Amino acid sequence: MVKTIELKLLPDEAVREDVVRERAASVAGVSIGEIRHIRPLKRSIDARGYRPVVLLRVEVYIQEDFTPEAPLLSGLRDVAHRPPVLIVGAGPAGYFAALELIEAGLKPILFDRGKDVQTRRRDLRAIQQFGEVNPHSNYCFGEGGAGTYSDGKLYTRSHKRGSIEKAMRLLVEHGADPDILVDAHPHIGSNKLPKLVANIRETILKYGGEVHFDAHVTDLIVRDAKMEGVVVNGAQEYFSQAVILATGHSARDIYYLLHRKGIRMEAKPFALGVRVEHPQPLIDRIQYRQDPREEHLPASSYRLACQVDGRGVFSFCMCPGGLVVPAATAPGEIVVNGMSLSRRDSPYANSGTVVAVEMEDLRPFQSYGVFAGLEFQKSVEQSMFAFGTGGQQAPALRMTDFVAGKLSASLPPTSYIPGLLPAPLHELLPKGIYLRLAKGMEEFGRSMKGYFTEEANVIATESRTSSPVRIPRGKDNYMHVEVAGLFPAGEGAGYAGGIISAAMDGQNVAQAVARFL
């Protein structure tokens, strides 16, 4: 017999197998000896009471053995001589599409403009230490995509878009901690993701796929509204009836290429704002009412949202125990993002805090047509760079000064390695963005006592929350609405927002490609 039960445990109890087994037996109404296996289903933190507790949902196997499912990878077969499918981009959408294609008996051939996940580290060091941006290898471009070195959060609300469980199991089979199958807000960490990403590449190669780095797709081969292949690095041609475009939200050159080819795109809403950085102990005091927090409690997080003057203002990509990193993809711009290592043990907490940007906000950029939002993004990023010293120092203010619209005389300590520069963000940000952010932060301070503080840095610019362009595709066939064989996928296509949603979109697109071929 198998019973599903709910347990409520203190943090130090939840890490002890003997306590969990004893409590499970009590709740299930059986003796400890009758329990053969306990399978965790869900784990979350409830911090609403006097002391935070861990909520566990488990399956209890009572006088019955537990049989684990067969590994997903055990069903793969060699596809070296099967029909090829070209994939542009080796991020989560591209890599998970490749695994799905192998399962369907097709050969994936991947091209990424950046470098393999290990070599890519050198370019990250260059931007952190010296302010040098490699436009092909940075925090956004390279093997694993933007998520590899910017946190690896796996939470998604896209439950209707595909099999979250399948995507998570594939991550575990490639080296992720099995806890991600259970945690309410699963996370891997930027120190562990590179090895996992390399393992996925090895699986693709093992079963006959190909992965090419420093392989910048510079043209698409299209005849009579049908895809025939791609051109790499301006010279080498590769041919296939199906091309998956999984280039991520920052590959602006791909949008320009599609425009030159007359391939239809659409402008779409996105969000833009800043990254807010607090001391992590302050967030722990607010959320857990503890200082220091208990040993077995994770660094606390938050999620905030409100409406200001008809626009949503919300926190995004919250990184407890994290770092703020430079995420520019071209020289002459300042873009920031957040990340955490697996232990989440940095003394800082940061979160994107952004304002929804709708089409009517882009009227000054209407002459750019479908690229109005993209040019709006660029104008803000470039104005932040122009204010600075020519490197990757980021403009910032204390939160209280940001809201008051005045320059800070000094700034709190920060995790941002290139350093912060006091700057008049109230003048550098678009007026509507600034005013809504300022009102939103005051509102957040009322709903989360202690959030609004001079101890927090407001750092510009958090501008790559999602793509400002969508590549339209059919609802059921996932194929471009006008070009047969072109399959836009993931965040760059405008259909995902994070590692897992992009991975699931890649899987869905690969299944559609299999049906098409």
Image (spheres, rainbow, N blue to C red):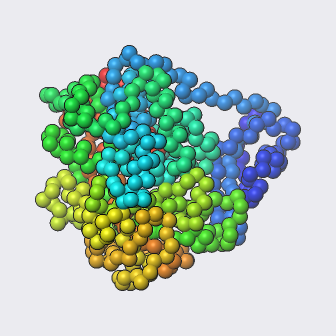
Q: Quadrant of residue 441?
A: bottom left
Where is residue 31? Give x, y as percent. Answer: 87, 42
Q: Nearer the viewer, residue 307 or 106?
A: 106
Given residues 79 and 396, the one toward you in this image is: 396
Q: Residue at x 46, y 18 (%)?
A: 78
Residues 412 and 354: in front is 412
Does residue 281 appear anywhere in the picture?
A: yes
Query: 435 left or right of 498?
Result: left
Q: Quadrant of the N terminus?
A: top right
Report x, y in % for residue 249: 33, 49
Q: Is residue 240 above or below residue 49?
A: above
**Quadrant position of the C terminus in the picture:** top left
User: Residue 64 placed where, x, y %?
Assistant: 77, 31
Q: How many marks?
A: 0
Residue at (57, 62) in percent of width and height = 346
Relative to 184, residue 223 above or below: above
Q: Does the rendering let one see residue 164?
A: no
Name the residue at 70% across, 40% down: 39
Residue 271 at x, y percent in the picture: 34, 61
Residue lying furthest top in this view? 81
- Residue at 22% x, 49% y: name it: 266
